[in-house]
Amino acid sequence: MVDKEKVRGCILLSALKRFSHYGFNKTTMAEIAKDCSMSAANLYRYFKDKAEIGLCITKNHFEREHKIIIDIIERKGSPSKKLGQVFLALVNYNASEFDNSPAIMELVDHVCTNGSELIDAHREKMHFFISKILKEGQQSGDFRVSNIDETAKTIAFASIPFHATPVFLLLKCGGHTRETMQEMALRVADLMVKGIKKKKK
């Protein structure tokens, strides 16, 4: 009996390799099918088109990122440190994901154009994660935040340079190294923490 999830995983992995090195636009369903040792007709049993494959790859990317952040939130430690760890994790995860992916921006462009719901859901997740850290800090007395929701949105916005597309552009085109991005992530997180840290009397 065919393990459909295993086959889907093989398809997504093969497609990602092609999107990363040859570009989303040049890659065909026939090429992806060949890489998976199947016919193009069989490939369409799992995905209706290349666009759907691209969105599924992105969804998986976001889900892996979310698991990393959840792990940070659930660890023991101060909320202040957790915020810095989240920013640093964003840099490390996305830099690793886009290593040796010269043509990945075509997939990014596709998702930006056709995956607004996916991006919005990811954004909401980031707001939720940061809100959890803020609430923890509020309860422990580390933070003093008048409006957790608005503050979480502001901090999430400040984290944008450390997400997938900005990291790719800054590393490949902006003359930055992973080390400089890591340093900047920690600096930004530190500024955020200083702004919400409860002042000692």
Image (cartoon, helix red, strand yellow):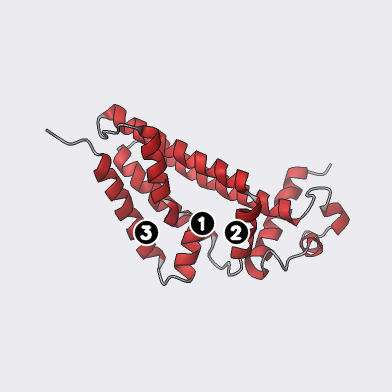
Q: CA distance from mark 3 to mark 2?
A: 22 Å
Q: Residue at x 26, y 43 (%)?
A: 195
Q: Which residue is mark 1?
A: 164
> On screen, 119 above or below 18?
above
Q: Earlier in the sequence, mark 1 or mark 2?
A: 2
10 Å crowding of disc 2: few (<14), some (14-19), many (20+): some
Q: 8 or 169, which lies in front? A: 169
In the image, 157: left or right of 12? Answer: left
Q: CA distance from mark 1 to mark 3?
A: 14 Å
Q: Residue at x 26, y 33 (%)?
A: 144
Q: Are marks 1 and 3 in contact (CB under 8 Å)?
A: no
Circle 1 or circle 3, nearest the eye:
1
Q: Which residue is mark 3?
A: 182
Residue 71 on image: x %, y %: 45, 40
Q: Earlier in the sequence, mark 1 or mark 3?
A: 1
Q: Are marks 1 and 2 in contact (CB under 8 Å)?
A: yes
Q: Which residue is mark 2?
A: 108
Circle 3 or circle 2, nearest the eye:
2
Q: 17 or 142, which lies in front? A: 142
Task: Locate residue 27: give its quadrant.
Answer: bottom right
As shown in the figure, which amino acid type bears the numbered disc 2? Val
10 Å crowding of disc 3: few (<14), some (14-19), many (20+): some
Q: Regarding mark 3 in the picture, which secondary structure is present there?
A: helix
User: Which mark is drawn over residue 57?
Assistant: none
